[in-house]
Image: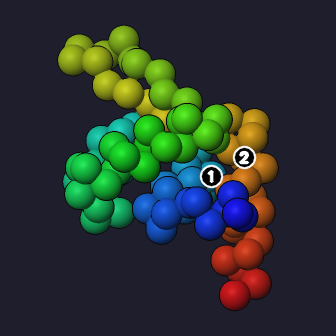
Amino acid sequence: MYKIAALSRAEIIILLSILDKGNIMISDVVGGRMRMSNTTVYRALRTLESLGLLETEKTKDVPPRKRIRLTEKGVKVATLLKKIEETL
């Protein structure tokens, strides 16, 4: 099976958004401009984290928030996805 087929539309959108914007907060994704449900976002984030494509970090803000960033592997995958998007 092809591994890229395992990525959902939501996961691809999140990867490309983080690549374009750099580190983002989970709140930017949940209920944000991407218009995805909380369930969809959190499921996608868990999958991307388990694949080693992104990592989260709690901020020292009160209340604490989570920042999302791509791993080195995530940057490679997102860059390839962006090239595919530009080609299409």
User: Badge 1: few (under 14), some or many (20 or more) residues near its Cα, within 10 Å?
Assistant: many
Tell me the SS state at disc 2: helix
Task: Classify the position of the N terminus by image quarter.
Answer: bottom right
As measured in the structure, the alpha-carbon distance from the residue carrying label 1 to the one carrying label 2 is 7 Å
Residue type at numbered disc 1: Leu
Q: If the image is split into quadrants, where does the C terminus sit? A: bottom right
Q: Which residue is mark 1?
A: 19
Instruction: Work out whether residue 23 or residue 71 is closer to the camera in this orientation and state it.
Output: 71
Give the structural element (helix, strand or loop) at label 1.
helix
Residue at the spot x=25%, y=50% of the render?
39
Q: Which disc number belongs to residue 75? A: 2
Q: Nearer the viewer, residue 2 or 78?
A: 2
Labelled pair 1, 2 in contact (Cβ < 8 Å): yes
Place of residue 54 in the rendered image (x, y in percent of width and height, measured from the top left) = 58, 37
In the rendered structure, the answer to whether residue 52 lies left or right of residue 21 reads: right
Identity of the residue drawn at 44% across and 38% down = 46
For the question of whether residue 70 can be seen, the reply is no
Whether residue 78 is situated above or below residue 2 in the rendered picture: above
State whether residue 54 is above or below residue 58: below
Horizontal side of 34 relative to 55 (left or right) equals left
Most foreground residue, 10 or 32: 10
Q: Position of residue 13 (x, y in %)?
A: 50, 63
Q: Is residue 80 left or right of residue 13?
A: right
| Of the image marks 1 and 2, the number of the one nearer the N terminus | 1
